[in-house]
């Protein structure tokens, strides 16, 4: 039986469910409306104006003066674009791995026949910058280093700023996947000297899946211009040429509906203030962690300081079965995620990115608590007496 959440405004609920997974996230009502507009030509002045306005504001979100491109592709497309434009067979690429998404970088680098050097941490822990330094000292000729800022599969945030200092001392390019954190956490691309930084539309930007964003530094261009690229759709040189045309455009047809959505989502972010958006993400993340700990549950990341600001990973309580538990949470009106790959059944994950406020966290924690009570899990006594 589905419990009706009469106290929740319904526009953001698909089938009366509140979506609290780590992307896609629920959309604002104005974003939904923006997407109902009629098509325009993808080579028109109107699209050019819209595209330029979005790119300029995305640069502010990325805190960068580097080039920035919008790709009509999900986040993985941006990961592939980053590597396709700089990797030639045999190039040494250092991939830092600590979960499913950081491992994806390694897989893509292998497809492009890179000579991959791996620095890994246990799933649940962050990358150790000292190990990155040791690997770079050992392998003198690393061309680029990949880091996943927010490892969505484990709820862990990696120390990009520290890693950047090491990588830049070494002279390699730094590629950062900020797909599930850009817009929700502080990631100043220029200050941290990130050469290629990636973000995804369906995460903190709260628009549908289908766009990814990639910023490209001057240092990255130097490498790209010397690389015999093996990409067509993702050839960044053609994106730069097209954006420089009059009117500005993309080499291939951009998802116009998503551009309407992005323009609206950026309006909302700028109206709220970029720093306020980040502060809200930090505050809902803390509320979530405090809430699950108060129930007697344990966070999955090995230390609270490395916990993600956009997704909270929680160890599956003793004796509770993943499918049954998440089904119960769903019956109480909220959709959360399970673990991926080797963490299937071991953890559950609550996404709190995009438009999420205290109110949705409160609803989510109540649904989790109720599901655990239904399953006879011994919640902390104090909580039961409240
Ligand atoms: C950190 C990270 N990287 C990459 C991806 C892949 O993005 P997509 O599923 O949009 O291709 C995701 C998606 O969840 C992610 O969280």
Image: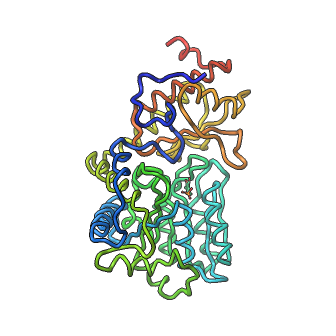
Q: Toward which corner of the image does residue 222 lie, by quadrant?
A: bottom left
Residue occupying image coordinates x 61% and y 60%: 102
Q: According to the image, what is the colour scheme of the structure? A: rainbow
Instruction: Point out residue 97 in the picture as x, y percentages from the top left corner.
Output: 63, 60
Q: Nearer the viewer, residue 112 or 264?
A: 264
Q: Quadrant of residue 262?
A: bottom left
The residue closer to the viewer here, 189 or 302, is 189
Give the quarter of the figure containing the N terminus.
top right
Position of 137 relative to 352 (above/below): below
Nearer to me, 188 or 128 = 188
Residue 56 % position (x, y): 30, 65
Q: Where's ligand 1: which quadrant? A: bottom right
Left or right, residue 112 beside residue 187? right
Q: Could you say where residue 330 lies in the image, as x and y percent from the top left?
A: 58, 30
Which residue shows up at 42% across the image and 69% down it? 215
Residue 302 lies left or right of residue 262; in this view the side is right
Q: Residue at image x 46%, y 32%? A: 361
């Amino acid at each position: 039986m589905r419990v009706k959440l009469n106290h929740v405004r319904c526009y953001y609920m698909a089938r009366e469910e509140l979506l609290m997974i780590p992307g896609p996230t629920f959309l604002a009502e104005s974003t939904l409306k923006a997407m109902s507009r009629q098509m325009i030509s993808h080579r028109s002045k109107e699209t050019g104006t819209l595209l330029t306005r979005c790119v300029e504001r995305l640069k502010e979100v990325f805190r960068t003066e580097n080039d920035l491109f919008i790709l009509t592709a999900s986040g993985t497309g941006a990961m592939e674009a980053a590597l396709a434009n700089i990797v030639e067979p045999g190039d040494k690429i250092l991939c830092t791995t600590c979960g499913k998404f950081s491992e994806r970088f390694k897989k893509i680098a292998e497809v492009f026949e890179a000579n991959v050097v791996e620095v890994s941490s246990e799933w649940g822990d962050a990358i150790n910058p000292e190990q990155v330094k040791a690997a770079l000292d050992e392998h003198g000729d690393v061309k680029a280093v990949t880091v996943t800022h927010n490892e969505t599969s484990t709820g862990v945030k990696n120390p990009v700023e520290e890693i950047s200092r090491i990588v830049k001392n070494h002279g390699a390019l730094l590629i950062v996947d900020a797909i599930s954190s850009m817009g929700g956490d502080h990631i100043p691309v220029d200050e941290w000297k990130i050469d290629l930084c990636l973000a995804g539309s369906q995460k903190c930007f709260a628009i549908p899946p289908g766009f990814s964003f990639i910023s490209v530094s001057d240092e990255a261009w130097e490498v790209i211009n010397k690389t015999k690229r093996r990409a067509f759709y993702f050839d960044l040189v053609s994106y730069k040429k097209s954006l420089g045309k009059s009117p500005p455009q993309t080499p291939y047809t951009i998802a116009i509906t998503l551009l309407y959505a992005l323009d609206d989502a950026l309006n909302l972010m700028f109206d709220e203030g970029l720093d306020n958006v980040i502060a809200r993400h930090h505050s809902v993340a803390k509320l979530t962690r405090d809430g699950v700990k108060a129930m007697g549950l344990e966070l999955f990341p090995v230390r609270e300081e490395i916990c993600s600001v956009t997704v909270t990973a929680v160890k599956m309580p003793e004796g509770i079965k993943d499918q049954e538990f998440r089904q119960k949470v769903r019956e109480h009106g909220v959709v959360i995620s399970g673990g991926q790959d080797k963490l299937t059944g071991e953890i559950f994950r609550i996404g709190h990115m995009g438009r999420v406020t205290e109110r949705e966290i409160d609803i989510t924690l109540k649904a989790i608590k109720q599901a655990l009570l239904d399953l006879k899990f011994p919640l902390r006594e104090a909580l039961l007496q409240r």
